[in-house]
Image (tube, rainbow, N blue to C red):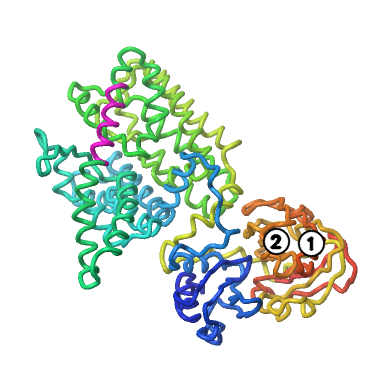
Amino acid sequence: MAVDFAALGDDIIDGVGGLGNIKTARHCATRLRLELRDEEKAATDTVKALKGVLTVVQAGGQYQVVIGNDVPFVYARIAERLEGGGAAAEEVEDDSNKSVLNKFIDLVTGLFHPILWPLAGAGLFKAFVTMFATFGWLNAESTEYVVFNAASDALIYFLPVLLSISAAKRFKTNQFTSMAVAGALVYPSIVALTSAEGSLTFFGIPLVIMSYTSSVIPIIVGVWVQGYLERFLIRTLPGAIRNFTTPLLVMLIMVPLILLTIGPATTILANGIADGITWLFQVAPWLAGALMGGLWQVFVLFGLHWGFVPIMVQQLSTGYAIITGPLVGAVLAQAAATLAVWLRTKDHDTKELAGPSAFSGFLSGITEPGIYGVNLPRKLPFYFGIAGGAIGGVFAGIAGAGTTAFVFPSLIALPAYLSTPNLPLLFIGIALAVVISFVLTLFWGVNDAAVAAEAPAAEAAPASSAETVSAAPVAAAGTEVLVRSPMDGKLVALADVPDPVFASGAMGAGIGVEPTSGTVYSPVTGTIIVTMGSGHAYGIRTDEGVEVLVHVGIDTVNMKGEGFEPKVEQGDRVNAGDVLVEVDLGKVKDAGYSTTTVVIITNTAMQKEVAPASAASVTHDDTALIVTA
């Protein structure tokens, strides 16, 4: 049964004496390293007995809770609850050199991470409902359609409410207050104001209303501002009224503030862009098509696409909306990029997400799961989708493409484009948009290693207390996996390794190596599932499901990467004999640490036998362990 990592983190906090007793917290490849204010307050026997804890070591002023490869997930919960985080310097990503755009992309994808699977499911559900209604298999006027449409559309419609939860975790606000603020933005009477005639005011202040359903940016900015307001109120309000007055004032201030500032700013910007592109369609249709096709998904990302809706409706009143012509290429280009990732990626979770996301994008024009879960985190697929959409938009503009109905651009919606004056040119543009995006992504846009390297940041706020990790593949009974020595040197029994946790076998069966050279090689063929910023430890999962930990030196995490030159990243595919890291053994010795390198089978309990080799002196080509599944 899978371990509930968030609950384990909470239990460890309680077991060591509560949050107040934790001075600092960090982790290495296998252990939580806590500095406690008073170790006597820790119920060590209770912590040791927790499911998921292998053992506890108290040494060097640290309270070390040994977890194994899953330690980052447990640490994420502890860091979340500690005021100010508590991440070790080596675990904190230095983003000072990142561009503003990259920081924004990282923020948005991080906030979407907890809802990616429901979003993908909703998109696929919506695609089937749309398909059934289009082909007449489901009457669009029936009660059944109303129920299914609501079930498939609700998550995307109420997207601001869901995002408010993850944003609240990110910006450390009360998530229920954030949900209340988001709920007000999509409240039926507020949505109804978008169709109100005449000007609106709020206590005499002009109120410009936009549709906040399915929007992203307004609630993210709103919760970010809420964080500052909430912390100010908590510091200043009297304790007797603080608990109920803080959320009251936050809702009282934030809802009007968003409606009076973020909404108008977004609407004014969107209307300005829409008016400019409408004029451009008259003087340079090819350029207008390129801009609409290339930037449409960017407009969606920032919520600026709503500014185009009134123009689309106005044009449709005359029977033909030319501004919608380039959109089908833009949407299908992003779906094509997602499809390319699905075909090329070796990451199991990404493949599971990309498949249905691409299907819903092609079939019904629902691209949110593909954009936020697949393309945007990898950046290049999103950019290639923009490039394909721009090329397709040029052809759509020249073709005079448009729609005769208000539809979501998709394959199913193509009949609405049949009135295009030069229909073949439109279809050529759509085909080019798809092919360009697909080919560019297939060959240059799928970088699992780069995305996996950023995974700890995305996992910093677990989706729920039930978050778990998918199980590894299981080898057929009797399968033998040969594990090589990671370094040239001399094999030593695990019991003789100068570390009580490794020597006890609590982490699993294995062997030690006293190295004679500083090159560390992969002992097996498989995928890197764990790397440390300090470069001292690597977890590798073989295709048979054997999980191998290579830990270079003892307590070398304290060197913070000094003397280590990693050659691989998390997510990389390695062959036995590939170099993992170059180590300056002299620096390790000078720092006072043992160079003994340990090879551990961390899922020993799942194997039939782990037998160490009998040889003493070995090279990195020699077998160190024989694992029988």
Query: Quick check: 620 above or below 101?
Result: below
In the shown orientation, is residue 455 left or right of residue 619?
left
- Classify residue 179 as left or right of residue 560: left
Q: Residue beneath label 1, please? A: 486
Q: Quadrant of residue 63?
A: bottom right
Q: What whole-number distance in Å separates the C-alpha atoms at marks 2 and 1?
A: 13 Å
**Which segment did they paint magenta?**
262-276
Nearer to us in this view, 282 or 403:
282
Query: What amino acid type should be assigned to the residue bearing mark 2?
Result: His
Kindly state the secondary structure of the residue where label 1 is placed: loop
**As shown in the figure, which amino acid type bears the numbered disc 1?**
Pro
Q: What's the mark number on residue 536?
A: 2
Pair 2/1: label in front? 2
Left or right position of 294 against 183: right
Where's residue 578, x and y in %? 77, 52
Residue 611 is covered by the magenta coloring: no
Residue in the image at 72% along x and 67% along y: 479
User: Depth check: 199 or 281 in front?
Assistant: 199
- For the stretch drawn in magenta, the main secondary structure is helix
Q: Using the image as rendered, state which of residue 417 and residue 518 is in the foreground.
A: 518
